[in-house]
Amino acid sequence: MKKINWKVRAKSPQFWIGLLGVIASPVLAYYGLSYADMTTWESVGNVLARFFTNPFLIGTVGVAVLSFIGVLTDPTTKGVGDSEQAREYTKPKG
């Protein structure tokens, strides 16, 4: 099985912004909220507390994260792994 160079992806701000969106969007949609409703740390904490007590929503976010990983795959290689060249990178290619 081919591997994915997670160290390089973790150094990318785009990765984290995308992952945050993939996690936050279904949570906010489920509760009928928007990003504009998250204006205080208390409101963010309340949503997180409600999220962790909802197995359905946890499963929904899990599936969304798996979809995100699918989008991250290198389309130039067969399967879901990175090319040998990409696995050798220590930082994103410039």
Image (spheres, rainbow, N blue to C red):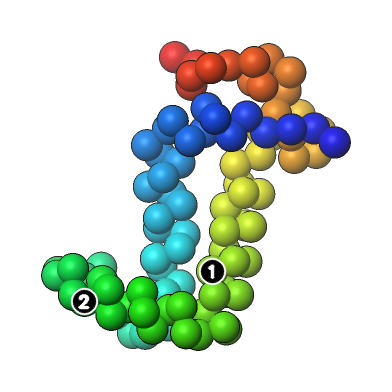
Q: Circle 2 sits on which residue?
A: 43
Residue at x 44%, y 14% (from the top left corner)? 94
Front tag of 2 and 1: 2
Of all residues, the one furthest to the right in this rendering is: 1
Residue 6 in percent (x, y) is at: 59, 34
- Relative image position of residue 58 (x, y in whole percent): 54, 75
Within 10 Å of disc 2 (Cα), the crowding (few <14, some 14-19, many 20+) is: few
Indicate the amino acid at tag 1: Val
Residue drawn at x 74%, y 32% as measured from the top left: 3
Hey, what amino acid is under mark 2? Ser
The answer to whether residue 47 is visible is yes
The disc placed on residue 61 is 1
* Circle nearer the N terminus (2, 1): 2
Asked which quadrant contains residue 36, the reply is bottom left
* 70 sits left or right of 27 in the view: right
Q: Position of residue 50 (x, y in %)?
A: 38, 83
From this view, report whether residue 59 is shown above or below residue 10.
below
Residue at image point 46% right, 52% down:
19
Instruction: Work out whether residue 58 or residue 28 is closer to the camera in this orientation and state it.
Output: 58
Q: Residue at x 27, y 73 (%)?
A: 45
Q: x, y (%) of residue 33?
A: 29, 80
Answer above or below: position of 64 versus 15.
below
Going by the image, does 22 lie left or right of 40? right
Q: Secondary structure at mark 2?
A: helix
**Judging from the image, what secondary structure is the residue with disc 1 in?**
helix
Left or right, 27 with reference to 34: right
Image quarter hosting the N terminus: top right
Q: Which mark is residue 23?
A: none
- Residue 9 to residue 36: above or below: above
Q: Is residue 34 visible in this depiction of the protein? A: no
Give the Cα distance between marks 2 and 1: 19 Å
